[in-house]
Image (cartoon, rainbow, N blue to C red):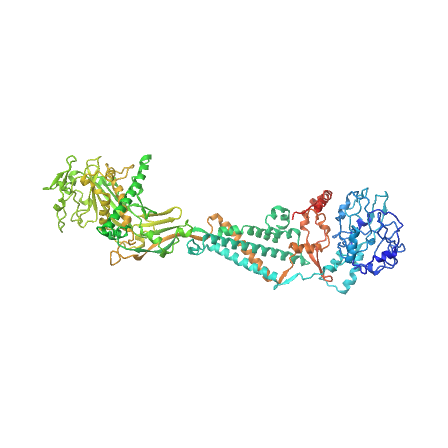
Amino acid sequence: MAESDHSRIPYSLHPVPEVEESRLFNSQTSRDDRPSPPEGLLSSPIFRRDGYRPMPSGSIDLSPLDGVTENQHVARPDTSYSQESDPLGISIQGIAKRVSFTRVPVGSKSSSPATPRFNNGFSGSPESGITSPRAESGPASLAQNPNQDLVSPLEETPVTSPNSLRTATRMGKLTMPWDDPPRDDGSWGPSSRDEIDLGRVNPSKEGHRQDATSVGSDRGNSAQMRNDHDAENHDSHDDDETFYKRYSHVPHYCDSRKDVHRRRANWLSISIIALSIYSTGLSCLWFVVAVVQPRWGPTISSSGGIAPSTATMVCAMFAKTIEISFVTVFVAFIGQVLTRRSFVKSSKGMTLAEMTMRNWVIQPGFMLTHWETLPYAAVTFLGAISLIATIASTFYTTASDVMVSPKLKYGGWESKALNGYVLSSYANTFATQDSCPTPLRKEDPNGPEFAARSCLDIQYAGQSYRNLVSFLTVWDEINHNGTGASLDMSHRPVGTTLLYDNTTLTTTWVKTEYSNVTRQYEEKGRIIHNVTLAMPHPGVYDAATNPVNKILQPNDLSGVGEYAIRASVVSPAINVMCVNMNEEELAPLIYTKWENSQTNATGVGNQTTGWAGWEGEVPHPEEDEWLNRTAVDDIFRWGPTYGRRPPVFQLYPADFNMITNTTVYQGDAIYLLAKSASITNYTLCEMRSWVTPNCSTHFNISGTAGSHMQAHCEDPDDPDRYDRSVPEVTPEKPDGDWKNIADQWRLSMDINGGTVNNNASNARTLTQFILEQGKLNPLLPSMAEALAVFASSTLVIGSIGTPFIHYWDYETMQLGEPGALATFNATIRTQEYTSSHEYEWQNVFYLALVLVLLINIFCLGYFLSRSGLVTDYTEPQNLFALAVNSPPSEQLKGSCGGGPIKADFVVPWKVAYAKGPNHYFFEEANGQTWRKKQDASADTEYQRARERSSYKRLSTSRTWF
């Protein structure tokens, strides 16, 4: 037997770790006739454990346990060694007595903590879970396998060689010292103490109790073990005392490979600082951009530069990199602060709640799923900063999208000089003919001039009828619903027209002080309606869309852009004055009423008309020839006093007919004579045109709503009025060239059809608008209003390519293509892609941008002020490596299964260091258990958790991945 025992002893033995002695000695002694161990075996140096004093000669008699198999070799104890003489305090009380070591949990100040378990030098690993001492306070059933044997730790020789390992494996399952005790039929008696005295054994299999005395405390042994080492090299800043106090066996195997401090030249330090600089720089740029709100102009547009979608994507990408780098830097900052604090002996260390702060920033939802850490960590300064950083990082991408990402936005009104091409003077007949698009200039047999005139006739006819129909549509709605229009001319419906078939031009009534029919009737005893209609300058459209002004068009902004212009330019205007006259008052102007006139009957009642050559009988214009005087000379400003001659008509028109005169010598107007069937009087209308300086042109264009121009006139508060931009303005003067355009217009409309009584539809419609009373009709327009709208097409066609000022400033009356660039003042408000927010309430996102910037600056300053980095023990891999090489703690008892709860989160921890073995480990920063009254239920919860433990089910289940 001795030879067999010696044959199993290896040449060298590694230190044997402490085990849970309660599981070794809480079994029943089976028999006392055990063979003795070989002589000198237990006193051999190979059984000495590092850190213990040499044992006196003698042998230890460890009683064999019940159920030892026949193949196991059992050592017979030597009873000659007494307990009192043993310096280690090992108790030997005969063959039937047990050896018991009282295991004191770490954290207790009464004795030193137990040695952590490890497998150095053993061939097998534990097969079953380890029962906590606190778990033994309650009853436990051990009846699963009553035949299982329990073996003393010295009865199983450690296997250190691979051969031995393979041999032991083939022998079957090894029974290791840390295995669970055998399950007996009886139950284990509960202990009234929170921590069971491992020196007391209450076996129940034999129905009797055997007592084992305590071998002594670990404190004396630990102190003695440290003496030699401390005397050799003692440093007051090292944690050797704590280290040896916590370990009865020095873990030489965990000699730290690297120091906890990394210099600034280390890759990790460089990368953290680089990320911090990047995050700080870009977050600063993002904040500045959000404050300045730059407008990108053509840099971001659909026609050039960066496409809007690309710009949005790039902005979002950089914002995400800022967020990621910020989170990385801040998490590193938290880890450095907490780890450095845990090294400082005089500090409070770090708690589990503070370690979870890094998870807030990385995973904001962690605060909802693990809210129990918030009351402990959020109330600290670092916790408050972490909470702020979490909120800022969570909303940073959203803040960037709201405040920095480019989006279409109007800028403010700004004064700007715009340029537009000028081709000819206002109402230039030749220029209008040249601008009319027709392919028949070379095909017309009468030459290009006739082709151009025909083209203009079509333009006039089309636009004039369109304008009149649009105007009558508005009045039809008023007449149909019976609401009635205002009697104030400035508020009555106006006409509209189209420019290039894509821009609506809205007119405005001006000089409305002369349009009061009631006052005129009271003052002059006749019905007079004098109206003036102003048209926005169509040249503003050409200037706005001209690339020379670099205004982004809607097509440049993904088809949805907008801009607005208030141009200080003149506006073309048409004046129509209609006066009701009876037959006698009109006779001086009717050829058939002259003496010796040659007339012919028309076949319509008693109507007569002048012969074909009647115009030759009209006196030729001479210096002193002003034709006949009338009762309305002062109204129309005829005669030598005004230097203007009146018109002469061939006949009185019939009902629903009109006749015209456009041949007055050196005249500046055309005249129209109409007859309404509702009254006996005739109506004589004078039509003139000029450019007015009392207006500004407002132009708005939108990719979705289209473009619109409007004449804004006679507004005393309008700073963009032309007469304010150009103070030296001459009085308005009718333009004589417009009469030529109007003559072409009336031919296209066949307004002179009354000479042959053609009863034209346009004449029939217009004559029914003749005023019958000395006031305006709220349900119908007057004839003057309708004629002004009808002839407004001449204003548009006659002002394209004309000056923006009230005079012609060039030598020739018509310039070649493309014309001369003319400048005019304007106030412009454009829509461009701008890095800005859209609504006032979105200013709240400034907070996210500024918080990230400030925290970035703070973190960058922190990293630059340090000489390098320390190992971040809040990182999971570092935390795990340090935790598994640290002793267990009583202050976290019960947390191994379900995790820490309540006060476990506020237990402070420090990173201790033992210089001799070069080992780092966790230790409590305080010596008291952090338990509160409300946490007293944790013990009960622990016992319930043990009873319903799912470890067996989880350990035998299959994994998915």
Q: Is residue 631 visible?
A: yes
Q: Residue furthest left?
A: 596
Q: Position of residue 940 (x, y in %)?
A: 72, 43
Q: Left or right? Give the position of 486 relative to 386.
A: left
Q: Using the image, determine if residue 600 lies above or below residue 727.
A: above
Task: Name the quarter where the N terminus is drawn.
Answer: bottom right
Q: Position of residue 688 (x, y in %)?
A: 23, 47
Pick the front one: 783 or 303: 303
Pick the front one: 202 or 118: 118
Pick the front one: 762 or 490: 762
Q: Left or right? Give the position of 931 relative to 385.
A: right
Q: Quadrant of residue 803?
A: bottom left
Pick the front one: 39 or 350: 39
Q: Quadrant of residue 629?
A: top left
Q: Left or right? Give the position of 606 relative to 775.
A: left
Q: Position of residue 323 (x, y in %)?
A: 55, 54
Q: Is residue 380 visible?
A: no
